[in-house]
Structures are given as C-alpha cells and as structure tokens.
Image (cartoon, rainbow, N blue to C red):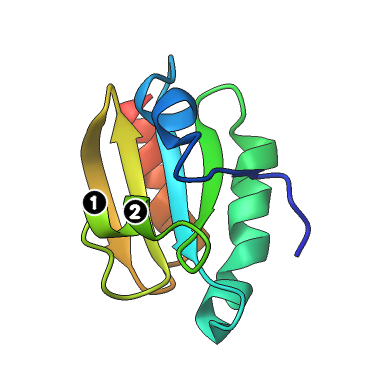
Amino acid sequence: MTDKALAVTDATFRSEVLEADKPVLVDFWAEWCGPCRALGPVIDELAGEQAADVKVVKVNVDDNPDVAREYAIRSIPTVLLIQAGQVRESFVGVQPKGVYLEAIQSDA
C-alpha cells in the first residue's frame, strides 16, 4: 500500500485523532483483508486531495486492538469520521469515494 494516510497506533490515536484541530477520517483495516486493500487507494487519494479539510489516518486492527475495541469495530473496512473527539459518520464496508467526500465536505 502507498501511505499518504498517516498510520496511527493505540499509543498515538488520542493525539493524532481525538485532539486533532480538524475532522479526521479513520480507516480501520488489516493487511489480510481484500476489501481493505481495495479501499486503500481511495483512502490515499482522499488524504492527498482533502488535506486542507480533513486529516486521513489508518489503524491496523491487528496491530492496534485497543482502539478497534474501543470503537466496537466488528467488520473491516470500517471508516469513521471523527470531529472534536466524536464520531460524526460511520461507514462499514467499501463505499464509493463520493460517499466519503460528501461526509468530509458536509463537516468541513
């Protein structure tokens, strides 16, 4: 995977996501997950194209089980839009890029 999106861990989630000064799009994924790999390029495109409006990060659920458990991630990929520490939108499964863009732009 190319990584325009920032990799976030259990240790850095609070500072990178909850304390961020703008909305954060969080992609919960795993290396073995085919749909997650399919979504990866879309997430990276959003990270590049929407950098002014939203921070885009990825959380590997295998390596960071605490954050995944805290947000009750039961299926991957799951993408959350978090603003001011609160979940504003939640998407389970692969969605078209426009769905994420609409959520980002409505919260920006």
**Label 1 element class:** helix
Disc 2 and disc 1 in contact, CB within 8 angstroms: yes
Q: Residue at x 56, y 69 (%)?
A: 39
Spatial separation of the CA atoms under disc 2 and disc 1: 6 Å
Closer to the camera in the image, 101 or 72: 72
Q: Give percent across and percent down for residue 35.
A: 52, 81
Please identify the quadrant where the N terminus is shown: bottom right
Q: Give percent across and percent down for residue 29.
A: 49, 66
Q: Give percent across and percent down for residue 101.
A: 45, 45
The numbered mark at residue 50 is none
Figure label count: 2
Q: Which residue is mark 2?
A: 66
Q: Which residue is mark 1?
A: 70
What is the quadrant of residue 91 in the picture?
bottom left
**Is residue 101 among what the camera can see?**
no
Q: Tag 1: residue type?
A: Glu
Q: Give percent across and percent down for residue 27.
A: 47, 55
Q: Residue furthest right?
A: 2
Q: Tag 2: residue type?
A: Asp
Q: Residue at x 54, y 73 (%)?
A: 36
**Is residue 33 among what the camera can see?**
yes
Closer to the camera in the image, 66 or 8: 66
Closer to the camera in the image, 105 or 78: 78
Closer to the camera in the image, 73 or 38: 73
